[in-house]
Amino acid sequence: TMKFTSNLSREDKKMINSICLRSLNAHCSRVGGQARQMAIGFLWQIMPALNRYYKDQPEKKKDAMYRHVQFCNVSNAIYPFLAGLVASMEKDNSEVDDFDTSSIVAVKAALMGPLAGIGDSLLFSVVRPIAAGIGISFAQQGSLLGPTLFFLIYNACTMFLRFSLGYVGFISGSNFITTMYKNGKMYNLEVLYDEISNTVYYFEYARKAMGN
């Protein structure tokens, strides 16, 4: 783990840890109903990155906040991966004048479904039944260890996922953006994005050149 994060500064780690902690209540907000789901929760989670990278760029910060109030829904413990990846892309946007911000929206939209499916399957079909099985075996004997073990096992697993995936997402996001820029902007990513309605209608990621 130390080797994995050795290239990150203290400020990077502080920001990522803050993002991971904020994921604990990212699902508390349903402002906007079904149309936005947990969008405000995601914005709350990503704010440490926006505050840091757009400290002296109020217009870019405003645009970034607007980007992240559209529909978003991912398994809670998996949220930091997506937030970390998006944070790395926002960092690049703060440093590059002609950065294509529609790619941030497109990548976020592309990962939401798979991450939600993986997260729900892992947590609710694997981790929770195992934790419950261990807890029930003690609870049947009238021991308080039953609910205690269930609580500790399940939450230990989710906390490990939160913080490890937050770092993985941030580092992977930087690598992804670097690769995409090596191939040339809009070479591997094609997006149909309506900036006025803040909606992605179509996107495609491929290894071959697309479009004109």
Image (cartoon, helix red, strand yellow):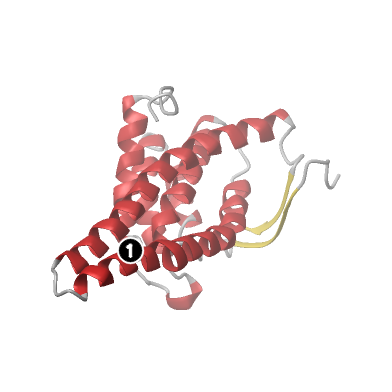
Q: Nearer the viewer, residue 97 or 89?
A: 89
Residue 210 visible somewhere in the drawing: yes
The crowd level at tag 1 (other Cα within 10 Å; few <14, some 14-19, many 20+) is many
- Is 93 above or below relative to 201? above
Q: Nearer the viewer, residue 146 or 52?
A: 146
211 displayed left or right of 57: right
Q: Nearer the viewer, residue 176 or 69?
A: 176
Residue picked out by circle 1: 131
Q: Split into 4 quadrants, where in the image is the N terminus?
A: top left
28 displayed left or right of 170: left
- Is 97 above or below relative to 188? above
Q: Split into 4 quadrants, where in the image is the C terminus?
A: top right
- Please give the name of the residue rendered at 77% of the width and 46% of the height, measured from the top-left corner: 206
Q: Identity of the amino acid at label 1?
A: Ala
Q: Residue furthest right?
A: 212
- Residue 150, horizontal then vertical, whole percent: 26, 64
- Label 1 element class: helix
Q: Quadrant of residue 137?
A: bottom left
- Please give the name of the residue rendered at 36% of the width and 44% of the height, measured from the top-left corner: 163
- Please give the name of the residue rendered at 58% of the width and 32% of the height, measured from the top-left corner: 175
- Residue 142, horizontal then vertical, whole percent: 14, 75
- Residue 72, horizontal then vertical, whole percent: 49, 63
- Please give the name of the residue rendered at 47% of the width and 56% of the height, measured from the top-left corner: 68
